Image (cartoon, coloured by chain):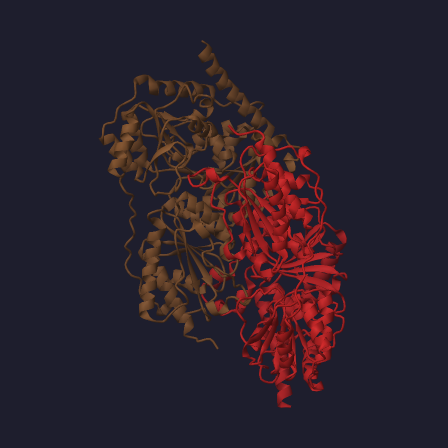
Chain colours: A red, B brown
Amino acid sequence: MPDPSQGMINLQWAFALIDGLAGAGISRAVISPGSRSTPLVLACDAHPAIRISVQVDERCAAFFALGLARASGRPVILIATSGSAPAHWFPAVIEASHSNIPLILLSADRPPELHGWGANQTTDQQQLFGSHLRAFHDPGPARAEDAAREQLHRLGRQAAQQALQPHPGPLQINLPLREPLVGDPLQLPAPRPVEPIQPSCPAADPTLLDRALSLINSGPGIIICGATDLGLQFAEAVTRLAAQLHCPILADPLSNLRFGAPDCSTLICHYDAFLAGQAESLQPAWILRFGALPVSKPLLQFMELCTAPVILCDPYGQWPVPAPHTELTLIADPVRLSDAMVARAPTAAPADWLQRFRQLEQRVARLMAPETLDDQPFEGCLVRELLESLPEGSLLFSGNSMPIRQLDSWSGSSTKRIHLHANRGVSGIDGNISTFIGMTDGDYPATVALLGDLTFYHDMNGLLAAQGRDLVIILLNNQGGGIFGYLPQSGLATYETYWNTATGLEFRHTAALYRLGYQRVAQQSAFRPALSRALAEGGAQLIEVVLDRAFSIEQHRHYRQLVNQSLTDDILS
Amino acid sequence: MPDPSQGMINLQWAFALIDGLAGAGISRAVISPGSRSTPLVLACDAHPAIRISVQVDERCAAFFALGLARASGRPVILIATSGSAPAHWFPAVIEASHSNIPLILLSADRPPELHGWGANQTTDQQQLFGSHLRAFHDPGPARAEDAAREQLHRLGRQAAQQALQPHPGPLQINLPLREPLVGDPLQLPAPRPVEPIQPSCPAADPTLLDRALSLINSGPGIIICGATDLGLQFAEAVTRLAAQLHCPILADPLSNLRFGAPDCSTLICHYDAFLAGQAESLQPAWILRFGALPVSKPLLQFMELCTAPVILCDPYGQWPVPAPHTELTLIADPVRLSDAMVARAPTAAPADWLQRFRQLEQRVARLMAPETLDDQPFEGCLVRELLESLPEGSLLFSGNSMPIRQLDSWSGSSTKRIHLHANRGVSGIDGNISTFIGMTDGDYPATVALLGDLTFYHDMNGLLAAQGRDLVIILLNNQGGGIFGYLPQSGLATYETYWNTATGLEFRHTAALYRLGYQRVAQQSAFRPALSRALAEGGAQLIEVVLDRAFSIEQHRHYRQLVNQSLTDDILS
């Protein structure tokens, strides 16, 4: 017969852990329903510093937590019951691991004596996520001794630390719990004071910094700010560095340097359109890389073809293998690194170096003024109008596949600050709605997502969390995986069946199911009014834009040709 | 620059593997869209023995494949692209591992040279599913040499073997592929002849069989057939054994012994209602267990309190740890074991032993004639009418949580064969719709699922596969996780928020989204006509039954009390 005091022992045990986590500055928990996890949920509920969100689908829960952590920069707790429940976290765990997003995964488990002989909802939960975890702990079943509880409290703080430093990411604490599972929260101790962990990033090793500077002083180079938002301070620091070096910054849309940049004189945004075939004519002496790899394929190909040595700033020592041409990896805070380089007064490039990039940028910017035909919705126009319509400081979440590429091609730059985010860790079409909705808890005047139809379908369950929030989802419905239309698979007879895989769903029913405001946009001219209406009305809003895949590809080719023609004319003239 | 012949090398490589798998008798593949997986998809498409199903959501794909494999007993291939895509398989992998269902997981991967430095959609895919796999292989990137391809062909056959024997379950083959990814299927060789693998299960070790029989001959015992359908042959064999031993078979609904049993004289189905508190009065000398643990909590508690030695038939040597009281584990085919026991002519129990169980069974069966009040839908009546309405040989898929417990309580027994299935490996509320739809590809005159509302919500994406199929989903909507209403958590102030977690969704919109026929049943008397209509109309049908949780619990307690009172009267008289 179960010991009735066990319920209280479990609750005190869980509370010690939660208080350790809360004491380190964690304030959010996302739970999914279950019985075995009861002590953990009660402990979170009893803790004044923890705010709980509930999500029935654990996969959505994990991506929602990822969104919360992405917006706040602080670790978020996830709680699920035993069995297959924690396994649903896996896709978000992989994304968090590659995007450096701290998550604390608390998997409730059955105690050891129920393992290995077929007891219900019992499976091996040890290190469920393999190499994708920063750390794994299993403190064993709850113990009544003060010393054991004290140790678990310390483990909470330690775990929060490990989720943030040296490399932010997900970790799992597996918690076997014996029945009974309910205890009395009124008997819990008072929480201890909160002393948030302040993660810090190292300065560059001086010897390596010397080597980097001698490369940089060897000739004119390029700074590439990839698909990571490194913050406003970084934007300022890297802009100062580029100004000093007189070199271009090729800024991925997700670097957020394009939106609200402190100084646009070194900023290059249209490389995706003009860089193909320019590896020889624009050959730099070095490349300095910040953030994740950029989205643009022409830029990636340019980097591959360039023989210039690459200097990589990898703040967390994230990458065990040097990327191609990477001569030097600096494990250093990007702001401190940029400042340290400026302080060494590196040699500026000759005036015409930056000038060549700026001329290309300006010419292409003029050519890439998006226009549509017969009022057909077209991504170029949609992106421009969206960015123009958003209030300063808005959150814009982009789906992978085409939306982020369309933003790359068409965003241009502006002085208005927009916080553009996407799950580029492994660039999945999964969990995008939930990540977005998690991010809407941040402090933004407007929150908008731009998602393709397969991405939208994949995470529809995430819409349950949209209720009671102000947000707009722009669903770019081109009836399937439009990105494959740009790949060789599009020539196959089975292309529609196996690659495009249109769902054929009428998403207005999804809007009805989740009580979203719904507008369908079939003309380009209807888009801006629809967006204004959605933003003005508030609540959760869905705008479905009907796109024609063939037309999109045609337009893409049209503008590519326009740019190529202009560049060729230039060479011939 | 990529080598264009690489596309053909990839395709030949993939075809060698698929032909190896097909040659072993595999005929189904479930794919999700992606680019990296192209050679695998083309190879499946080119293979005449392989039939492909497409599912956009990899989580649904995996549970759908699990359903196909559950219905056919044959391994099913799963294909996904690189990145987080294969991670969505994890919940189904855990279920398959515990339910002994063979799955061949083919994860397309980026080649080694793209790993470890942030290349897009690249993550560590080695042994993604840890201890939940039967085997893991990574043959490396495609090679052009005949010998290498021949070796991969052999690996295909070997993998099919490993997914079936000695312990059926999931395995992963990770397949790094270099660009370009498209090759010409017309240049592929002819498939080799199919020689299906015929898995076999061992006979019991003779010494252990002797020990089992000496236990069985020591006094009257009980046979428990748990939550696993071991087939018609087993039903006959174990019934012969029980007849010879003159002992009761306590048959879980998922054993399928209750429906179409060859001889009902030893069959006991109402133990869930009468067994509580009977561990002393019905103490057996031994328990012989087949299949997974039963669903019934009173039966599990009875087994825990009984001091009788348990003999467990574990055909695959699945359990590393002996379950409580398990004196002897026989790794043996259940049919051969039953037959071998009968052949040894074991001692029959005294006549009154079986008689006591039969009297209880009959008395409780009379008391458990379900009736409702004011025409309110009630699970007891729903289960009875459902089982009466289904044609002989139908598939009935049950959700976990309450549906399977209601079936346990109310199914009774009948001579009509029904194939009742559920995901009882880890008993999750996940992937139930997809598993069910996968199973509908089997040969059944009607296919019906009985699912709670949280279970239904969790896997709504799975409904995309319902189009074009004949199936009926009965959604028991009691607004949340009704099972928690039976647990101590139901007394907590936060019960509704953290445990019941009602979604508040109006599922008629789900029906509209997925183009399901829809009927809403709010009176018990409307249920049978609605079911008849749905079965007669064909296509994919949803019947939403509106249940009142409080009423269900009340009725549950009413019938428990009725039975308890009757048993107490019996003791007093």
- Residue, x 45% and y 26% (percent of image)? B272
Q: Is residue B373 left or right of residue B279?
A: right
Please tell me whether residue A242 is drawn above or below residue A516 in the rendered image: below
Task: In this rendered view, identify the residue nearer to me: B470 or B103.
Answer: B103
Please tell me whether residue A304 is drawn above or below residue B458 in the rendered image: below
Q: Quadrant of the C terminus of chain B?
A: top left
Q: Residue B147, percent across and down?
A: 31, 68
- Kindly tell me whether residue B239 is visible in this rendering: yes
Q: Quadrant of residue A91?
A: bottom right
Q: Residue A345, percent across and down?
A: 72, 80
Please tell me whether residue B522 is drawn above or below residue A260 in the rendered image: above
Q: Residue furthest top?
A: B573
Task: In this rendered view, identify the residue nearer to me: A430 or B542.
Answer: A430
Q: Is residue B311 left or right of residue A163?
A: left
- Kindly tell me whether residue B47 is visible in this rendering: no
Number of numbered labels in the structure image: 0
- Residue, x 58% and y 74% (percent of image)? A328
Q: Residue B92, percent across and down?
A: 47, 48
